[in-house]
Amino acid sequence: MQPAPSDVHVNTPLTNISVAYIQDQSYFIADTAFPNVGVQQQSNRYYVYDKGDWLRTEVELRAPGTETRGSGFRVDNTPTYFCDVFGVHKDVDDQTRANSDSVLDTDRDATQWVTQQMLIKRDLLWASKYFVSGVWGTEMTGQATADATHVKSWDLSGSTPIEDVTTAVVKQTELTGLRPNTLVLSPYVFNALRNHAEILDRIKYTQRGIVTEDLLASLFGVDRVLVAWSTNNTALETATVSMSFIHGKHALLMYANPNPSIMTPSAGYTFSWTGWFGATGLGLRIKRFRMENLESDRIEAQMAFDFKVVSTDCGYFFNSVVS
């Protein structure tokens, strides 16, 4: 039967629980690092304006009785996005529900579990798209000594993370005309920085003398420092748990446009399919429907999105910057 009952009803109360759970999860950065663009169609084109045309002046002196110089800019309309749909479900069987102290708790627990699954998946995809070597226009790798393509690893004595990042801010601004506003750190990198002698020396006369994300942002000259605390069990089901941080030992300095539009650049955009039935601004919907053959209610989470690198010049990657 088309459409199926589960396609014409999205459970608003459970969706609200899921959305609240997403907002509480500050460890995950896939929803905050880059601007989110809600789209009505699952796939479409977007526009990339030529950087050279926007950063070169064509203004000339106008002589009496003559026209001003005419010029313009080129637009590449070939880039596309496609919001893949990701999903997972948890069945709540009648016997478990009957044995629970509260009917609502079983649905809430299932909703929070499928939401957690989604959050982990999104951060894994985000890291594989943006937080890896070979993506961004400029890349520096950590090692024992600094040279043209390397910085001294920030957990080593004598390294200079403040100079490394602030120099990258200057270089990227010169290259793009856009000052980087966001620095994403893995927990290992954040830990190295908050214990680094150079940084501790800079803040020793501050009121608290404690290295926080806001303090690092001030030192580095960016608006935000985000620490990607999300972790993931890489072992198969029933195997011994094997936990690791999703985002490795890297750092990404970037310009993330706070006001996305078709005429404004950004290192990346998240396209979320908001046009499908019942979806939130993140392309999320939670459904609850009956599976009578299992004597269970199914709590199903779906999310449709696409991560796109829009401007490689707007990202400066520090690869394996701690040992």
Image: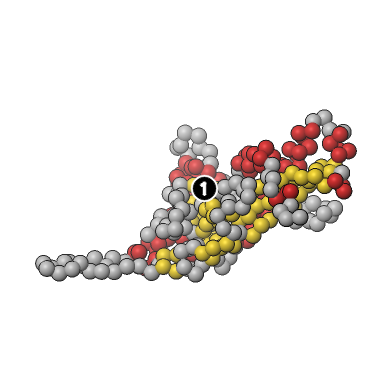
Q: Quadrant of residue 236?
A: bottom right
Residue that badge 1 annotates = 225
Q: Crowding at label 1, few (<14), some or many (≥20) Cα neighbours within 10 Å?
A: many
**Furthest residue in direction top, as rendered:** 101
| As drawn, 166 above or below 64 | above
Q: Is 257 positioned to the left or the right of 155 in the image?
A: left
Residue at figure coordinates x 38%, y 69% from the top left? 74
Residue at the spot 41% in from the left edge and 58% down from the top edge: 263
Q: Secondary structure at mark 1?
A: strand
In this orientation, which residue lies closer to the viewer: 145 or 284?
Answer: 284
Query: From the viewer's perspective, is residue 179 above or below residue 91?
Result: below
Whole-percent x and y of residue 161? 50, 54
Total numbered labels: 1
Q: Position of residue 150 (x, y in %)?
A: 52, 65
Q: Quadrant of the N terminus?
A: bottom right
Q: How did the renderer colour the structure?
A: secondary structure
Image point (55%, 55%), residue name: 40
The x and y percentages for residue 6 are 73, 49
Asked if residue 140 lies left or right of residue 87, the reply is: left
From this viewpoint, is residue 76 visible?
Answer: yes
State the quadrant of the C terminus.
bottom right
Residue 198, image x and y in percent? 49, 49
Residue farthest along the left direction in this orientation: 64
Q: Which residue is nearer to you in this view: 198 or 53?
A: 53
